[in-house]
Image: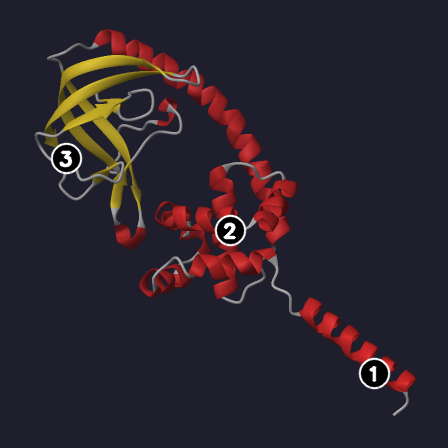
Amino acid sequence: MSVNKKLILAAAIAVGGVLYGCQNQTTPLEQFFKDFQRKIDRKTLAEFKSMEEDSLSNMYFLLSDQAWDALYANPDLNKQIDSTGVVQYHARIALLLVSYHRMLNNKDIQFFERAEKLREGYTALAEKNAKCDAEKIEVAKKTFGEWFVGDTLHLSFPVYYGPNGHRNASYYVCPSEYVSDTSEYFGLVGVVTNKEVLNLIDSTVVWHFFLKVVEKSDSETMLLLQNIKIGDTITVDLGDYGRLIK
């Protein structure tokens, strides 16, 4: 074989290798899938895969730390998500976990299409939350001024269902969304042992009650993912957590 033919053959092999490598190069999202999967156990993976997409939000709290760690180690994927305008922590986690769920179930991921919908949805939610925050402040101020150490408060918290049907009492998006006549609320009675106003570094002001729990409506429901027992002292900001039962 002549020298020229050898050079041509070598060049062809080199180009073919580059093209093959490009075709098989791991994308930032695929790398995220690999890194994330290493961080969760098989049982959780199987449960996550079997869930309906509409129910995946029940797993966000459980898997958000692992997803965030895998994203933090993936600057290229971070840049891609930044380019979509999805900046909120929860929106980024939702985008990634639904993408992973679709990959596991061999569905079209539609990463950028869903990112656009998330961006629009969270923009509208941010506007709503700004109004709600003002409402919460007024509720917290008013409540804080009306109740004192030694008073007994009867509180109600909305209940949400997590994985395996676990009941978790949580916070209100808006105080005005409270509905009194429903079984999907967790009742709690507590005696005020102290109260305080905190001025946080970011200029946020919170009004806290410290309550000693003397009664609760059931033993199965957790409060903010914690098992509350009779006699425990909890901290409550009535602008965010709990509503007085009149």
Most extreme residue toward the front is: 3
| Residue carrying label 3 | 217
Q: How many marks?
A: 3
Between circles 2 and 3, the one closer to the viewer is 2
Asked if marks 2 and 3 touch (Cβ < 8 Å), the reply is no
- How packed mark 1 is, by other alpha carbons closer than 10 Å (few <14, some 14-19, many 20 or more), is few
Left or right for 19, reference 6: left
The residue depicted at 49 percent of the width and 62 percent of the height is 34
Q: Nearer the viewer, residue 183 or 196?
A: 196
Is 206 on the left or on the right of 91, as rendered?
left
| Residue 70 located left or right of residue 29 | left
**Measuring 26% from the left and 38% from the top, which residue is drawn there?**
184
* Residue 40 sits above or below residue 179 on the image: below
Above or below, 40 against 159 in this view is below
Q: Which residue in the rendered view is the most extreme toward the bottom? A: 1
Give the residue at mark 1.
Answer: 9
Residue 181 visible in the picture: no
- Disc 2 designates what residue? 96
Residue at point 39%, 46% (across, down)? 65
Spatial separation of the CA atoms under disc 2 and disc 3: 37 Å
Residue 40 pos. (x, y %): 37, 58
Q: Amino acid at mark 3?
A: Ser
Task: Label 1: state its secondary structure.
Answer: helix
Residue type pointed to by label 2: Leu
Closest to the observer: 23 or 220? Answer: 23
Element at label 2: helix
Query: In the drawing, what numbered circle is on residue 65?
Result: none
